Image (cartoon, rainbow, N blue to C red):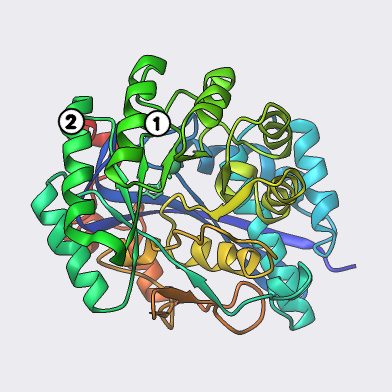
Amino acid sequence: MTKIERVETFILDLPTIRQHVLAMATMRTQSVVIVRITASDGVVGWGEGATIGGLSYGEESVEGMALAIDTYMTPLLIGQDAGRVGAAMARIGAFVQGNNTAKCAVETALQDAAARRLGVSLAHLFGGRVRDRLPCAWTLASGQSDLDIAEAERLLDARRHNIFKLKIGKRALADDIAHIAAIKRALGDRASIRVDVNQAWSVTDARRGLAALADAGADLVEQPVGRQHLPALARLTQDFPIAVMADEILRGAEDAFRVAAAAGADVFSVKLAQSGGVGPAAKVAAIAEAAGIGIYGGTMIETGVGTAAAAQLFATLPRLDWGTELFGPLLFTDDFLATPLRYEEFALVVPDGPGIGIDIDPDRLDALRRDRPRSLHASRAIPQAANPQAGE
Ligand SMILES: O=C(O)C[C@H]1C=CC(=O)O1
Ligand SMILES: [Mn+2]
């Protein structure tokens, strides 16, 4: 039997190319946990756990994920059969509640190693690709309409993105609507405009907001109200012509079933991090498909590791009506893949090769590690948790 021998976690801090303004946080750095699992045959698998804005997006932080993995999951994994990913994750599930993003990082690394051992892609293990390219949205979130329009024009000209997601919910409703209308007016039919409220609106705001968004020409609104308000989400889905997408409310298959049974959304944002890994995300997608709910390949703004893993799964989904937003690596000033992921013709090219399809440059990974001596970081690493201005 090939055994799991070693599980390592690395917290990385990656500066972003510009500030990324969301309802609940302003990102200038993205922090992630990278997991490396080594098996007794020497095969190595990689996984990633990412969240946004420290603890402001969800209940897991990168520091907490590293602790959960090192202290609670690793002892359950060492010595287990490296080829039995489902059994290893069931063992973790029996002793660790929640912590889906930490579980995602571990599960992805196990899946990657299992596929590499067989010399096949992860997509192959999930039934094989139905497409080689994934339509890829970009998020406009500079905080200013004129800068967002200029950025969108550049990306359209470069044929890199023609789907734009706008982050709103931080400003007054009327200001947000004016911002969206200005961007839609400038871009017209050349782009699909979608918005993400990240749970910021009250139900009353949402009723006014959805009507105005539909008038402004937006195609979709993501998680307009809090994740605890399923009945409200369902009413919004039924009452307004704009598509409503579920995001934060979905933490795995049980939530997906609950939302589908309540007709609570038109579209699911399928995320590996929120679901708990590649296998659990595939179940969320299967529930959407069975319920006639549209599918969108979501991100937690991951590096090339999490992005490649998601690309492998999304490439296998027969219906991917709303495309993906796997732009994560493009928002960072640095990456640590030996060969960067390719974006062309408004799409991410699904990487070839075994496992998740990428190779790591160990020196560049080391240079981004939070636990490197400060002098090696120069001035760039500002951990979210130590940056009190992050939420302003
Ligand atoms: O969907 C989210 O809420 C998280 C994320 C995905 C893209 C982006 O800009 O933020
Ligand atoms: Mn979202």
To which residue does mark 1 refer?
55
User: Where residue 252 sits in the image (x, y, percent)?
Assistant: 67, 39
When asked about the image quadrant of residue 214, the answer is top left
300 sits left or right of 131 in the view: left
Q: Residue at x 61, y 30 (%)?
A: 264
Find numbered disc 1 in the image and state the secondary structure of the residue it sits on. Answer: loop
47 sits left or right of 156 in the view: right
Query: In this rendering, is residue 197 above or below 311?
Result: above
294 sits left or right of 378 in the view: right
Say the numbered circle drawn on residue 364. none
Q: Spatial distance from mark 2 to mark 1, Cα to Cα?
A: 14 Å
User: Where residue 84 sits in the image (x, y, percent)?
Assistant: 85, 59
Which label sits in the foreground, 2 or 1?
Answer: 2
Q: Residue at x 36, y 72 (%)?
A: 364
Query: In this rendering, is residue 192 above or below 233?
Result: below
Residue placed farthest to the right in the image?
1
Say the numbered circle drawn on residue 392. 2
Amino acid type of disc 2? Glu
Residue 379: tell me if it is visible.
no
Find numbered disc 2 in the image and state the secondary structure of the residue it sits on. Answer: loop
State which tag comes first along the sequence, 2 or 1.
1
Q: Residue at x 73, y 54 (%)?
A: 279
CB contact under 8 Å: marks 2 and 1: no
